Image (cartoon, grey):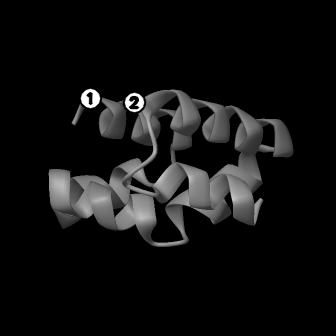
Amino acid sequence: MKTLLLALLAPERGPGTRLGALRGLIGVGKEAVRKGILDAGGAAERLREVLGDFFAERLVSDASWARGVLAET
């Protein structure tokens, strides 16, 4: 899981690597995605930067929606 998170959150990684990391994390399970990506600070912090605290807090509980929003930015 650590390898997948590093691949997902490293800014120098391409979109194919990030997509593969997301798919790997999804394979591990929904709770792993939530804990690993959103609670780890990387994506949650990015959501706050993009959307602000109010909307980020509501989006953090839905990993697929959060990934979609972050993919659009």
Locate the N terminus by quadrant. Answer: bottom right
- Identify the residue at image location x=41%, y=42%: 66
Judged left or right of residue 21, residue 8 is left
Picture quadrant where residue 21 is located:
top right
Furthest toward the front, the residue is: 12
- Residue drawn at (57%, 36%) of the image: 17
Question: At x 21% / y 66%, what residue is drawn?
Answer: 53
Marking on residue 36: none
Q: Amino acid at mark 2?
A: Gly
**x, y percent for residue 38:** 51, 60
The one of 54 and 50 positioned closer to us in this rendering: 50
The relative height of residue 22 versus residue 35 in the rendered view (above or below) is: above
Secondary element under disc 2, as helix, strand or loop, is helix
Three-letter code for the amino acid on which mark 1 is drawn: Glu
Q: Give above or below for 72 relative to 55.
A: above
Circle 2 residue: 68
Instruction: Mark 1 and mark 2 in contact? Answer it, CB < 8 Å.
Output: yes
**Secondary structure under badge 1?**
helix
Q: Position of residue 32 (x, y in %)?
A: 75, 56
Quarter that holds the C terminus: top left
In the depicted structure, whether residue 31 falls above or below residue 39? above
Residue at the spot 74% in from the left edge and 54% down from the top edge: 31
Q: Which residue is mark 1?
A: 72
